[in-house]
Image (spheres, rainbow, N blue to C red):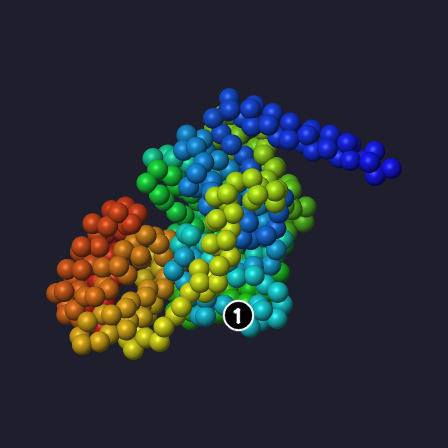
Amino acid sequence: MLSNLIPIKNHLNLNCRFLAKQIVLRNLHSKIRVLRSNQNNPFLNLAIEEWLLKDSPVSKPTLYLWRNSPTVVIGKHQNPWKECNLEAMRQNGVNLARRESGGGAVYQDLGNTNFTFLVGRKDFSKEANNSIIVRALSHFGIKAEVSGRNDLTVDQKKISGSAYKLTNERAFHHGTMLMNVDLKALGKYLTVNKLKLQSKGVKSVRSRVSNLIEYNKEIEHEGFCKATIEEFWKHYDDHCEIETIGKEIITKIPKIQNYFNHLKDWDWRFGHTPKFNLEFEKKFDWGLISVGIISNDGKIKKVKIFSDSLYPGMITALENCLSGTEINKQKLKNAIENAKKSSLVENSNCFPLMDQFCSWLVTTI
């Protein structure tokens, strides 16, 4: 009996591979691409996103939709020891993941949908991406608005947060969408800096966020994905087959396996946070900055900048330029001015922010 089933199984596998190949071939004639992950592993989903950013065709605007099992995702330059209740997460099996983009810490579970837009850098527009999401929500009678530097709100309550990453040729904009997230988990697993709460005039994260089911009981992951895909097609005036990504992709594409291993690695997620002898903190309009410095003989031996800024390249450039610099106002100013020349800095919009950082640092250190 078993021998009779084996050919059937092989035939089904061949059919699946054939259908997948047909989708790819049909999409060759489309100028856009839509992918959905059927996996909830945060490290795999983030690895797929990284692969799309670094290795997908620049010419094809891409929409990628996915969701994770319970996870806290922190920004590239955030300190997990300060952002999260790691012990509570460990006890309850909540993952810690660090993304490659900037921005703040977010809690995700299956009540949240993640969306990612990928385009060539010259075509990047977060306004266009936001408009696609806003129109998708209008399918459910929900009127969302863009708020602040990276949020979407309904009735002044946050229902979505975004972050961005730019490379030389590509750009992505990814965000969360709170459908029916366990909001109690936000207070349980996230430790939010008091300066950040004060700047927003609220007492807790929970007090300023809301689930979409509070506005429409029918909204859920599948419906939102369908509406978003429809609006994505309308925006680009094109249509394409939807590519479903499963766990088998990790064995077929070595780069995804490499990204997966990197994103899951302890050093990437937690890093080594040394004991600093100088620490400063400041809340700017564009993000929270915490600077830790190990100094010796009047020089900065090691510097670490933790931040939820949406410009991770700028933060890395500042770290690089300050390391080894004399603790002298003019030397620090010169170092930060040199950092503006770094290819890591996202664009010239960062220069005024770097000037603000410089003015604060030289009067504080």
Give the residue at x 56% y 39%: 252
Q: Where is residue 130 in the image (x, y as percent from the top left)?
A: 46, 42
Give the residue at x 20% y 59%: 336
Instruction: Assign the N terminus to one quadrant of the image.
Output: top right
Mark 1 crowd level (few <14, some 14–19, many ≥20, 10 Å Cα):
some
Q: Residue furthest front?
A: 3
323 versus 52 height, above or below: below
Q: How many labels does the image show?
A: 1
Taking the image as drawn, is residue 139 in sight? no
Q: Residue furthest left?
A: 330
Give the residue at x 78% y 35%: 6
Instruction: Assign the C terminus to one quadrant of the image.
Output: bottom left
Q: Within the image, what quadrant is residue 321 found in?
A: bottom left
Q: Label 1: state its secondary structure.
A: helix
Give the residue at x 36% y 64%: 306
The residue closer to the viewer here, 54 or 130, is 54
358 versus 169 height, above or below: below
Q: Quickly name the residue at label 1.
A: 86
Q: Is residue 318 left or right of residue 4?
A: left
Q: In this view, does 121 lie to the left or right of 34?
A: left
Q: Which residue lies furthest to the right in this view?
A: 1
The residue closer to the viewer here, 306 or 325, is 325
Q: Where is residue 241 in the image (x, y as percent from the top left)?
A: 58, 29
